[in-house]
Image (cartoon, rainbow, N blue to C red):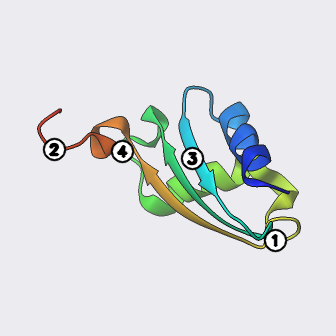
Amino acid sequence: MDAHAIRQLIEQGMPGARVEVQGEDGVHFEALVVSEDFAGKLPLARHRMVYATLGTLMGAEIHALALRTLTPAEHAPEGRG
């Protein structure tokens, strides 16, 4: 498993999301996922949405995934709205 494959799976499962994934060792990864679908949802619900795109890979091929889940408004730099 690599960061590129994880990014593709999340993008397929969450159309329109902006996804960045990093992870050099092949089992521990960090992801930033920016999606309108997160609006009004608590962090746990957002994380579950992302985990759902990865299915059984979580806990198997993907040992750990640290997530940052933001709406576009939350991700926008200050002053840009």
Q: Amino acid at mark 1?
A: Gly
Q: How many marks?
A: 4
Of mark 3 and mark 1, the one earlier in the sequence is 3
Q: Estimate the spatial distance between the alpha carbons at disc 2 and disc 3, rounded to whole Å.
A: 20 Å
**Which residue shows up at 47% across the image and 37% down it?**
35
Of mark 2 and mark 1, the one earlier in the sequence is 1
Question: Residue 78 shows which numbered tag?
Answer: 2
Closer-to-camera residue (76/48):
76
Residue 26 place in picture, x, y as percent: 80, 66
Residue receiving disc 3: 20
Foreground: disc 1 or disc 4 = 1
Mark 1 neighbour density, 10 Å: few (under 14) some (14–19) many (20 or more):
few
Residue receiving disc 1: 59
Mark 2 and mark 1 residues within 8 Å of each other at the beta carbon: no
Closer-to-camera residue (49/61):
61
Kind of element beneath mark 4: loop
Residue 2 place in picture, x, y as percent: 80, 55
Image quarter of residue 14 = top right
Q: Amino acid at mark 2?
A: Glu
Question: Residue 40 shows which numbered tag?
Answer: 4
Classify residue 21 as left or right of residue 53: left
